[in-house]
Image (spheres, rainbow, N blue to C red):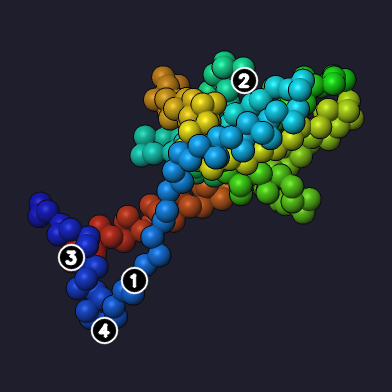
């Protein structure tokens, strides 16, 4: 079998045939570990005296997907169906955080911390059709009936906040678990998976021509 040429070379050839050039692309900036980010989070958390902070995160790589939450330094993690997207993994972690909260009257505030603003916003969308967002909304309804109202807090990823770094590592480790803890997967993830497979098949046929 012949070794296919690097994708970058083939891409340049295709651009030449199309008489197209790639303009300068906007670079993706990574959040740095700025001390003021940590202080800001601490100020928000300190507004609540009687509180439990639940850090959440999801991870995805070529091996699979995983989710985790960290509550009072204790890690809870799950290996997900390998075709699960990182967005779904983030949502799954939010749902598990809500499930973790006792459905009983309390004067304690639960802060649910996530670095996925999209996942948080999906829960806030009352018209969403996303099944995991709806599961989260159902939990919120159950909790509110017992006067428990969790507070969602967004933090940038890799911002140096200890709990956030811990849950990030836990979600990555969960991927390597010996078994899949959650086989269910969203239809949107199935569609993306099948689309990728079709592209790979097309790519293979194109390379063999």
The numbered mark, 2 or 1, whose residue comes first in the sequence reads: 1
Numbered label attached to residue 71:
2
Question: Label 4 near label 3: C-beta < 8 Å?
Answer: no
Of marks 2 and 3, which one's residue comes earlier in the chain?
A: 3
**Which numbered dot is residue 24?**
1
Residue at label 3?
A: 9
Q: Identify the mark nearer the N-term, 1 or 3.
A: 3
SS category of the residue bearing label 1 = loop
In the image shown, does 156 or 2 lie closer to the viewer?
A: 156
Taking 34 as reference, is 75 above or below it? above
Tell me which residue sits at (48%, 52%) in the image.
192
Q: Which SS class for mark 3?
A: helix
Mark 2 and mark 4 lie on one chain; the one further toward the N terminus is 4
Q: Alpha-carbon distance for marks 2 and 4?
A: 55 Å
Does residue 150 appear anywhere in the picture? Answer: yes
Say above or below: 101 vs 85. Answer: above
Residue 186 shows in the view: no
Look at 50% across and 37% down and name the residue there.
35
Q: How far apart, in angstroms, are the residues tagged by discs 2 and 1? A: 43 Å
Sequence-earlier tag: 3 or 4: 3
């Amino acid at each position: 079998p012949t070794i296919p040429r690097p994708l970058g070379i083939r891409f340049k050839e295709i651009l030449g045939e199309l008489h197209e050039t790639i303009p300068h692309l906007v670079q993706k900036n990574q959040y740095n570990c700025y001390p003021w980010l940590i202080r800001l989070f601490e100020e928000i958390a300190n507004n609540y005296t009687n509180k439990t902070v639940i850090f959440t995160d999801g991870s995805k790589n070529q091996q699979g997907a995983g989710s985790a939450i960290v509550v009072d330094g204790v890690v809870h993690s799950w290996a997900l169906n390998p075709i699960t997207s990182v967005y779904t993994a983030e949502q799954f972690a939010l749902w598990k955080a809500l499930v973790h909260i006792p459905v009983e009257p309390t004067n304690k505030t639960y802060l649910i911390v996530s670095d996925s603003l999209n996942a948080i916003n999906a829960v806030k969308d009352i018209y969403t059709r996303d099944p995991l967002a709806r599961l989260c909304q159902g939990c919120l309804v159950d909790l509110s009936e017992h006067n428990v109202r969790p507070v969602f807090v967004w933090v940038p990823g890799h911002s140096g906040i200890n709990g956030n770094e811990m849950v990030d590592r836990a979600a990555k480790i969960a991927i390597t678990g010996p078994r899949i803890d959650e086989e269910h997967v969203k239809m949107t993830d199935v569609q993306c998976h099948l689309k990728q497979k079709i592209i790979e098949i097309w790519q293979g046929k194109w390379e063999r021509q």
